[in-house]
Amino acid sequence: MIFLQTCNQHRKTIRLRQADKTVLGLKHIKLRGKLRVSTDYNSTNYFIYKGRAMGFQYELLSALAEELDVKLVLSVENDLHSAFSSLENGDIDLIGMNLAITQDRQERFNFTLPHSQSKQVLIQRMSSVNDSMPIIRNQLELGDKLIHVQKASAYVERLENLSKEIGRSIHIEKLERIEVEELIEQVSRGEIDYTIADQNVAIVNKNYYPNIDIDTEISFPQDMAWALRKGSDELTKAINTWLENFKGTARYNQIYSKYFLSSRILNRHNSEYFTLKSGKISEYDDLIKKNSKLIDWDWRLLSALISQESHFDPNAKSWVGAFGLMQLMPETAFRYDVDEDSKPEENLKAGTKHLMYLSRRLDKILIDKTDKLKFLLGSYNVGLGHILDARRLAKKNGQNPDLWQGSVDYYLLNKSKPEFYKDPVVKYGYCRGKEPYNYVKNILLVYEHYQNTVLLDETSSLE
């Protein structure tokens, strides 16, 4: 029976892998449990601020994944040509960006209902003493001008059509692997003279670069939508049904206002912990990098753990008495000779030493160490004893005690129920299993965001 189940599961896995290269229906996405989405890393769509993932597209896509009851798997792609290729190749299910719906694109892809609308505007510098270029207000004046835009963007098509309309050549420099906001910054610095952007993005960037002019429109309002592979009609319909309802909610209005209309936009951009600009996650990055070497971790992983524990607040204290950056319990802290009056760096080092201790213990326990990281994170949160209980329950019920997902995590999650924590193999009793269950998932999710947006220190390594 077990052999037949294994064979059936193997065949199902093969079918899913094959389906990844064909058009996936909604049921396949749900069966896989993941929605793979490519988005762009910039100051409006997806970014890290004070250690947390934010962004207009990120919040919309998170709400969609929540509706579909699947995990959102984000990848960053600031090159539109590459994003379209990934979609056509089946490497992703959706492009979650501000994509104008053009005729050429509709022939290649499915598009959702619009998630927003915007006009295209010319980005140019305002006249100054050192830069006396006249401001362009009439589209006829774009003749013979050189305009830098993203390759494969809707801006290219608009400029080509505009060139025909005015009867004069507009010179278009089509650039790969560059984001619209980078081009806006280049205009502000005088490195290039003109680029094109969507009006809502231009308004946000006007806060950052006061010397740019964004008042010259070059298009009518255009619908902005997401793209899917041609033929993925069922998934497109499901997304459209959700979008149609979601856009009428207060939550949608709040999301849009937060990223395009809020008075806090400039403060966010100027913050030392706006990762897009500074490359920093927190003020403790250097200390985290130093300590991550002790456990041979990617420093972004240790940052994700601290973000989950304390949100980088050294004065944080939980209702059960855990304190500091690493949220050490008093008895654990005593073992490493720290207390609530210890410095943040001492708390961080003590927490790292405790991770080392747990890691050594797990090395002696786990035969298959594939999921060691998940066991380690769970142990740090709830204690090794409860993790060992969950392993014993898994083994008793014919499951793999070295497998986290669908095995040990299931018994840990249910360890708050009498039929689980009163089982004779359980030694540590009741446990609020939902907390460590979510803890592991949340840290790995935050880590994915940090991997998407923060450079890996050259001297760091991953366990």
Image (cartoon, rainbow, N blue to C red):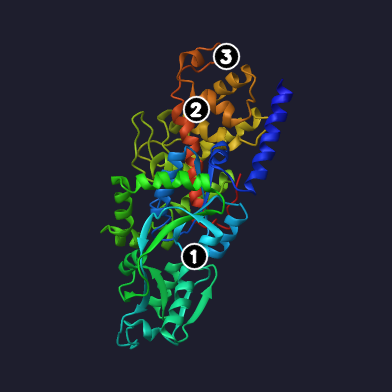
Please, is residue 342 above or below residue 157 in the view? above
Please, is residue 463 above or below residue 187 in the view? above
Which of marks 1 and 2 precedes in the sequence?
1
What kind of element bears circle 3? Answer: loop
Mark 2 surroundings within 10 Å by alpha-carbon count, few (fewer than 14), some (14 through 19), many (20 or more): some
Q: Which mark is residue 374?
A: none
Identify residue type, mark 3: Val
Where does label 2 land, which residue?
Answer: 383
Q: Residue at x 34, y 62 (%)?
A: 270
Which of marks 3 and 2 precedes in the sequence?
2
From the viewer's side, name the closer residue of 303 and 109. Answer: 109
- x, y percentage for residue 157? 48, 72
**2 or 1: mark nearer the eye:** 1
Residue contact between numbered discs 2 and 3, judged by CB atoms under 8 Å = no
- x, y percentage for residue 6? 70, 28
The mark tally for this picture is 3
Q: Which residue is drawn at 36% across and 81% down?
A: 139
From the viewer's side, name the closer residue of 186 and 3. Answer: 3
What kind of element bears circle 2? Answer: loop
From the viewer's side, name the closer residue of 45 and 81. Answer: 81
Which quadrant does the C terminus fall into?
top right
User: On the picture, is 282 further left or further right than 109?
Assistant: left
User: On the picture, is 297 further left or further right than 281?
Assistant: right
Where does label 1 land, which residue?
Answer: 103
Identify residue type, mark 2: Gly
Which of marks 3 and 1 precedes in the sequence?
1
Where does label 3 land, which residue?
Answer: 425
Which quadrant does the N terminus fall into?
top right
